[in-house]
Image (tube, helix red, strand yellow):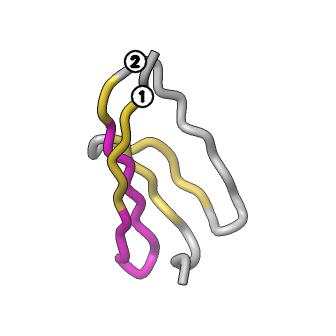
Amino acid sequence: GGGSGHRWWFIDGVPLADTDTRQDFTPTLSKPGRYQLSVLDESGQTARVEFSVVE
């Protein structure tokens, strides 16, 4: 599990970052509100989570 190889990250469908398996990244979200974070891996698997940012 956990996907493999390269990963592409999106916030609300907008490309945010791409990483390999060993990398971490921290998204910067400047405004409060609801967001959807999704990730796509090399095998075409996707995962998605919705969350809220509060002030």
Counting other residues with Cα less than 10 Å from the Cα at mark 1, is it few (<14), some (14-19), or many (20 or more)? Answer: few
Up-down: is 29 above or below 47?
A: above
Query: From this viewpoint, which residue is outermost toward the right?
Result: 22
State if disc 1 and disc 2 touch (CB < 8 Å).
yes
**Distance in Å between CA atoms under marks 2 and 1:** 7 Å
Up-down: is 24 above or below 43?
A: above
Whole-percent x, y for residue 11 in the image: 36, 42
Residue 23: name its quadrant.
Answer: bottom right
The amino acid pointed to by label 2 is Lys
The residue to which callout 1 is attached is 53
Residue 34: name its quadrant.
Answer: top left
The amino acid pointed to by label 1 is Val
* Residue at the (72%, 65%) spot, across then down: 22
Q: Is residue 3 left or right of residue 26?
A: left
Instruction: First in sequence, mark 2 or 1: give its number.
Output: 2
* Residue at the (61%, 40%) spot, across then down: 26
The label shown at residue 31 is 2
Give the magenta part as a residue range.
35-47
Q: Secondary structure at mark 2?
A: loop
Q: Nearer the viewer, residue 51 or 9?
A: 51
Whole-percent x, y for residue 37 in the image: 38, 48
Q: Nearer the viewer, residue 50 or 26?
A: 50
The label shown at residue 17 is none
Whole-percent x, y for residue 40 in the image: 40, 65
